[in-house]
Image (cartoon, rainbow, N blue to C red):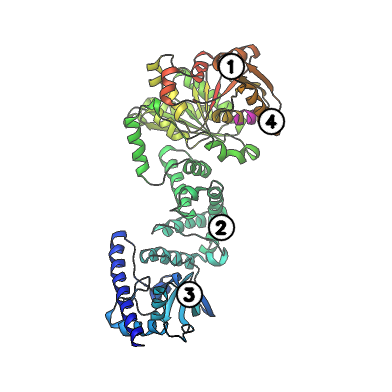
């Protein structure tokens, strides 16, 4: 027995040394190794109702707190006090007795998924030292509406306490049981209460009577919160932002919607902002700084937008249930050609029942309120009213290309006038703002010359590449929704043309669409332009640039040549 006790004392001293090392590592990592206080957690989470759960085998890793011994053990139940040596060693030595059959059950409180020791601290400590994963315990559960996990850190208790107070005020745990409104940053529940206050005011104005906060909170969840969270889930945004919660993303979307309305006069849809998140826009402000640095060191003509297919994946459901282009961006300079582009944008907006977002970019902040800018605003608004289209114009200072590409993230289609297509020379292509927009825009770009859009036929160039598949997706939509006659042209080169045609035929037939399929010899641009003139098509639908930006700038592309030589609108897809 003495030998067992001496060995147990040595184990105790080793465990204390581990506790010292754990404390040092905690200072470096910033994660606490302190046991949580049961009374503190219970008070903060407003947990009061108690129920007995009897004797259970519980996971030792989930035991993270204590009723009254926070300074005696670490979060991993390593001993801290020298005075505990004899008692700890006696418990440890018992486990070496030949007749040992197991320790008596400990007593714990359970809050959420975490356990707090009432009696049996030394037994837990010894069990962890022995590498046990389970221990028997008398469990008394203290019920709370706030999720509480074993890995909760002390500083996270502030969030939990705010959440508990929020639920107590709104009664959402009763009216909408099971809803998870967790946040990752303190102070967010005051924002949610502000949103609920707005809901309450609207409901009171609508009904002509006072509405209590409980009813307003339930209505806010149903009418405002859940629709946006559904978008967040459908787009898989939590996969891209694993350190955030659904409520974090909801708050970001709502606040940015308000910011854009205030700064630009644009009421951008929640789905558009969710799409911006899905395409890599980060919540942290450092990303905006990174964007400015990128633009400073990389020529605009050599920057690229998101990968092909991102926008299409976010619009697949709308392809069948809704319009593909509900939000359209059109830059307006105030010149004749920009007003012609606006007229064509109004035609598209009427077809799509879309909102038209105008963008007028000036060189300096003072020009935003100048006579020229106000004249553009008046002309834009007047034309929208006359066309019966909902439209809003933003006036911004900065680089035209940068502003177009930034705002394109918030819409579904960009319409540009084709007065200045990409030039034929290397320097022309490198400095072309039009090329830069095509390359960087996350959305399809409709380039419109002075000739009005003819919506009777379209020609799509298809070679099976990712960007040509984007073009085929959009062309299929136009053929179905706009009743366009469709021509699919592929270039015969090593059998690629025939393979591409088979893919296109299968895709369109799946969507119950017919088309005229043509395989041509020669260069892509030449074949597209020749067939387009021969068939008198009203619209070209092309994939965007396919090669590396530097290669495109050096040798040119089929897209550039079509833009230079056509007198018909060209829809360019990512």
Query: Whole-Å distance between the Cαs marked 3 and 2?
Result: 33 Å
Secondary element at image label 4: helix
CB under 8 Å between discs 1 and 2: no
Say which quarter of the image contains residue 395.
top left
- Expressed as whole percent of the image width and height from the top left, the position of residue 9 reads 31, 81
Bin the neighbour count of mark 4 within 10 Å (Cα to Cα): few under 14, some 14-19, many 20 and up. Answer: few
Q: Nearer the viewer, residue 529 or 87?
A: 87
Instruction: Name the residue located 31 percent from the left edge and 71 percent from the top edge.
Output: 19
Question: Reading the chain from its start, which is encountered first: label 4 or label 1?
Answer: 4
The residue carrying mark 4 is 506
Q: Which residue range is magenta in the image?
A: 473-480
Of the 4 image quadrants, the one containing the N terminus is: bottom left
Secondary element at image label 2: helix
- Expressed as whole percent of the image width and height from the top left, the position of residue 225 reads 53, 53
Residue 500, relative to residue 76: is it above or below? above
Question: Reading the chain from its start, which is encountered first: label 3 or label 1?
Answer: 3
The residue carrying mark 2 is 219
The residue carrying mark 1 is 528
Main secondary structure along the magenta-highlighted residues: helix
Secondary element at image label 1: helix
Question: Reading the chain from its start, which is encountered first: label 3 or label 2?
Answer: 3
Say which quarter of the image contains residue 305.
top left
Instruction: Name the residue located 49 percent from the left edge and 50 percent from the top edge.
Output: 238
Question: Reading the chain from its start, which is encountered first: label 1 or label 2?
Answer: 2
Question: Reading the chain from its start, which is encountered first: label 2 or label 4?
Answer: 2
Bin the neighbour count of mark 1 within 10 Å (Cα to Cα): few under 14, some 14-19, many 20 and up. Answer: many
The residue carrying mark 3 is 110
Please tell me whether mark 3 or mark 4 is closer to you in this view. 4
- Expressed as whole percent of the image width and height from the top left, the position of residue 65 reads 40, 74
């Amino acid at each position: 027995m003495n030998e067992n006790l001496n060995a147990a004392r040595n184990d105790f001293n080793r465990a204390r040394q581990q506790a010292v090392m754990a404390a040092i590592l905690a200072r470096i990592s910033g994660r606490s190794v302190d046991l949580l206080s049961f009374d503190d957690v219970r008070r903060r989470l407003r947990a009061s109702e108690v129920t007995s759960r009897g004797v259970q085998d519980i996971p030792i890793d989930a035991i993270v707190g204590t009723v009254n011994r926070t300074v005696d053990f670490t979060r991993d139940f390593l001993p801290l006090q020298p005075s505990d040596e004899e008692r700890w060693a006696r418990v440890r030595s018992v486990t070496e007795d030949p007749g040992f059959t197991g320790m008596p059950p400990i007593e714990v409180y359970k809050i959420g998924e975490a356990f707090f020791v009432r009696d049996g601290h030394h037994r837990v400590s010894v069990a962890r030292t022995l590498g046990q994963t389970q221990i028997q315990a008398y469990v008394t559960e203290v019920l709370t509406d706030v999720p509480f996990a074993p890995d909760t850190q002390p500083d996270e208790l502030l969030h939990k306490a705010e959440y508990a107070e929020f639920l107590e005020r709104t009664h959402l745990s009763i009216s909408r049981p099971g809803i998870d409104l967790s946040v990752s940053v303190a102070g967010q529940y005051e924002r949610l209460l502000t949103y609920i206050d707005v809901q309450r005011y609207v409901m009171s104005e609508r009904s002509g009577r006072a509405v209590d906060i409980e009813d307003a909170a339930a209505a806010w969840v149903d009418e405002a919160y859940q629709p946006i969270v559904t978008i967040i889930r459908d787009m898989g945004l939590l996969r891209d932002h694993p350190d955030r919660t659904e409520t974090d993303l909801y708050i970001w979307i709502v606040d940015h919607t308000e910011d854009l309305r205030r700064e630009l006069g644009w009421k951008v849809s929640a789905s558009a902002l969710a799409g911006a998140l899905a395409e890599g826009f980060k919540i942290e402000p450092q990303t905006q700084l990174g964007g400015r640095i990128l633009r400073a060191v990389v020529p605009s003509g050599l920057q690229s937008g998101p990968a092909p297919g991102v926008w299409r994946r976010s619009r697949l459901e709308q392809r069948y249930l809704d319009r593909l282009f509900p939000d359209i961006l059109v830059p307006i300079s105030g010149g004749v050609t920009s007003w012609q582009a606006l007229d064509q944008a109004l035609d598209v907006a009427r077809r799509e029942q879309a909102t038209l977002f105008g963008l007028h970019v000036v060189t300096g902040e003072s020009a935003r309120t100048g006579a020229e800018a106000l004249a553009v605003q008046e002309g834009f608004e007047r034309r929208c009213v006359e066309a019966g289209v909902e439209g809003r114009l933003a006036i911004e200072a900065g680089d035209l290309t940068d502003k177009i590409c930034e705002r394109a993230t918030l819409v579904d289609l960009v319409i540009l006038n084709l007065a200045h297509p990409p030039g034929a020379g290397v320097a022309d292509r490198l400095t072309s703002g039009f090329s830069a927009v095509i390359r960087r825009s996350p959305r399809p770009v409709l380039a419109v010359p002075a000739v009005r859009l003819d919506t009777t036929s379209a020609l799509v160039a298809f070679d099976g590449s990712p960007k040509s598949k984007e073009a085929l997706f959009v062309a299929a939509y136009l053929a179905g929704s706009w009743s366009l006659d469709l021509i699919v042209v592929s270039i015969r080169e090593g059998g690629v043309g025939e393979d591409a045609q088979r893919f296109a035929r299968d895709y369109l037939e799946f969507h119950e669409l017919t088309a005229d399929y043509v395989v041509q010899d020669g260069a892509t641009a030449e074949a597209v332009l020749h067939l387009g003139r021969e068939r008198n098509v009203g619209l070209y639908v092309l994939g965007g640039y396919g090669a590396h930006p530097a290669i495109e700038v050096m040798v040119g592309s089929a897209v550039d040549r079509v833009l230079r030589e056509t007198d018909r609108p060209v829809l360019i897809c990512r």
